[in-house]
Amino acid sequence: MSFGRDRQIRHYCEFLIAFVLLLFFSGMWAYSQQASIVRDLFLEHDRAVVTSLLEQGISEDVIARAITNTSGTEVGTELLTRIGITSHTAIKFFPFITDLQQQTGLFMMIAWVVLTGMLFTGTFLFFRKREQLYRQATQVILHFIQGDFSHHLTQANEGAIFQFFASVDQLATILQSKNDTQEKAKEFLKNTISDISHQLKTPLTALSMYHEIISDEPENVETVREYSEKTGLAINRMDILIQSMLKITRLDAGSIDFEKERCYVADLIARSIRELIIRAEREGKKILTDGSTEEMIFCDVGWTSEAIGNIVKNALDHTEAGGEIHISWEHSPIMLRVYISDNGSGIAPEDIHHIFKRFYRSKKSLDTQGIGLGLPLAKSIIGGQDGIISVQSSLNKGTMFTLSFLTEL
């Protein structure tokens, strides 16, 4: 039975068992004492009778036979009746029985007071400890209700009540986790809205200004064309910003289900840099790849190609004309690693720990058009597939990103 594991209940049960044993042995002792008292009273009565008979000259032999006789006769009964001693005679006329009643009554009263006191004392102590336990539990639960989860219910003992306390504590831990998650979600939403508002402010201001210029000079074809193009660029920048924020928000919220599959690394890299090769050629830069065409990777092709593309785009943004971006890969028993390196401007030591933060842009950055979401998005994509992204860089020498993916087991 589970209540037997509760130390307080177990101690109380042990107390009750001890009390019952004490009651039993007390009864046995009282029985023994009662027999002794009855014997003494009968001896006193017999002594008084014998003394009276001797004083009246009755022989000792006759008295001895009378005292040891165990059977009565009608003659004896008639004599007792004539002197007023019958079964209907009041107890008070039997002094030795009255004495017995008094002594027995006193003993029973004392025994009842002592045993009852012991029983009530033990029970009181048990319920007082129980009440203290319940009060402590009530206070802790009230703290839980108020959102304070720094307190914990007593779980030092075994038993049903402590199992219940453990379950309540687990429930409180779950509630605390949910509260923390909700608070983080609120803070995340607040920061996201603040970031989007801040990032949209510049292109919206530019759009407003372009609209004013076009409205003021509608007849000037060149002006209209120039600022229409600028308007298109601003709208495109806003679209990229919004799409990137939506993607990174969904990734951080865990609402993206990556559809992993096996594919060739070479095909994945080719898909990632297809459009960037044209840009590299236009800017006088090179994108070089090196790796076995037989190596395979287990990942979500669409999302992973976007992550690699963002890293290569970042490399192009920070590499001057004539620079090179190298993409290579290698396979180990448990990992497949993709290396993306460049010989560009590198990352300053004070910036390298911040490059994966949203909208972070170094003061020394060569990129004046970026919005600072490419690398954070890449990290969220790689991390969401249980991968790891790391970076090494030397200022004015170049940067290397390492993407590590677990081999499919």
Image (cartoon, grey):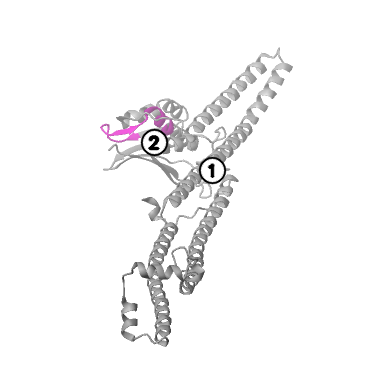
Q: Residue 96 or 314: which is nearer the viewer?
A: 96
Q: Amino acid at mark 1?
A: Asp
Residue 320 in sight from this viewpoint: no
Query: Measured along the vertical axis of the image, is residue 64 above or below residue 182?
Result: below
For numbered disc 2, what is the local secondary structure? loop
Q: Quadrant of residue 31?
A: bottom left
Find the distance from the CA under tag 1 to the CA under tag 2: 24 Å
Q: Position of residue 205 (x, y in %)?
A: 67, 27
Q: Quadrant of residue 324?
A: top left
The magenta segment: 289-308
Residue 54 in sight from this viewpoint: yes
Give yes or no for residue 10 being in the magenta stretch: no
Q: Quadrant of residue 211?
A: top right
Q: Can you say which quadrant of the picture contains the C terminus?
A: top left
* Position of residue 218 in the picture relative to residue 258 (left or right): right
Query: Measured along the vertical axis of the image, is residue 47 above or below residue 335?
Result: below
Q: Amino acid at mark 2?
A: Gln
> Residue at coordinates 49% horizontally, 30% vertically from top-left?
247
Give yes or no for residue 291 being in the magenta stretch: yes
Crowding at mark 2 (Cα within 10 Å: few <14, some 14-19, many 20+): some
For numbered disc 1, what is the local secondary structure? helix
Q: Position of residue 26 (x, y in %)?
A: 41, 69
Which disc number belongs to residue 180? 1
Q: Residue 317 or 176: which is nearer the viewer?
A: 176
Q: Residue 352 or 275: which is nearer the viewer?
A: 352
Q: Position of residue 246 (x, y in %)?
A: 52, 29
> Residue at coordinates 72% horizontally, 16% vertically from top-left?
215
Identify the residue position indicated by label 2 in the image.
385
Query: Measured along the vertical axis of the image, is residue 320 above or below residue 119?
Result: above
Query: Measured along the vertical axis of the image, is residue 216 above or below residue 167?
Result: above
- Tell me which numbered mark, 1 or 2, is placed earlier along the sequence: 1
- Observer-side mark, 1 or 2, equals 1
